[in-house]
Amino acid sequence: MRIGVDFDGVCVVALPEPGQPIEAETGAAEVLGDLVKAGHSLILWTCRNDDPGNPYNWLGGELREESSLEEAKRWFQEHGIPLEGINGWEGEDWIIGKARKCLFDYLIDDTSVGTRFKVGEVEYVCYETGEIKKTKTFCIDWEWMRGELVN
């Protein structure tokens, strides 16, 4: 099975400010790793990109060295989770042409109807001040998601 996976609010909790990922334990790495071990392939399906016009690629008026998309790809690499593609996959255009329709069997996205969330308080370091801040945020409830995937 080919599975599309959003990044923000799915693999990491939602961002409190541009360019500031929160590495809170969401459970995503374990479940996604198990899916790959079971023979499924993952497609990163995200709005993140390398475009200098993307506000998430800027920090304090400066273009970041690592783009928001590179940051997401690094998360998968650091967790040992291979991707079949990013916002598509090889051979997809042969099947549907250049239409930007996501072509996978299942999509894991925090905006999906019926998706359960966990809400909690997390700490993050503000890039601009270096200060440790707390915020309430959300991410997918990966215990629930594991059950849905098994079903």
Image (cartoon, rainbow, N blue to C red):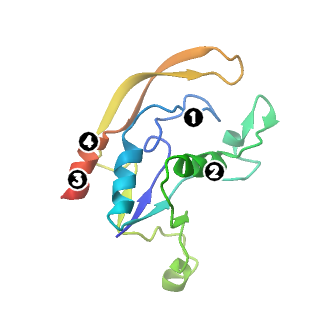
- Amino acid tagged 1: Pro
Q: Residues within 10 Å of mark 2 (few under 14, many from 20)?
A: many
Question: Compared with residue 29, is residue 131 higher up or lower down, i.e. above or below?
Answer: above
Label 1 crowd (10 A; few <14 / some 14-19 / many >=20)? some
Residue 85: give x, y in percent of width and height.
Answer: 54, 66
Mark 3 or mark 4: name the one nearer the start of the chain: 4
Cα gap from disc 3 to disc 1, whole angstroms: 26 Å
Single out the mark in the foreground, 3 or 4.
4
Residue furthest left as drawn: 151
Q: Is residue 2 above or below residue 67?
A: below
- Which of labels 2 and 4 is toward the front? 4
Measure the alpha-carbon separation of dots 1 and 4: 22 Å
Please report the residue visible at 81 percent of the width from the left and 35 percent of the height from the top.
62
Q: CB of mark 2 within 8 Å of CB of mark 4? A: no
Badge 1 marks a residue whose secondary structure is: loop
- Return the residue found at the far right: 62
Pick whichever, 68 or 74, lies toward us. 74
Q: Amino acid at mark 3?
A: Glu
Q: Secondary structure at mark 2?
A: helix
Among numbered discs 3 and 1, the one appearing first in the sequence: 1
Residue 143: which numbered mark, if any?
4
| Residue at the spot of label 1 | 21
Is 77 situated left or right of 118 in this image? right
Label 3 belongs to which residue?
148
State the CA–CA distance, disc 3 to disc 4.
9 Å
Q: In the rendered structure, which amino acid carries the disc numbered 4?
A: Glu
- Whether label 3 touches label 1, CB < 8 Å: no
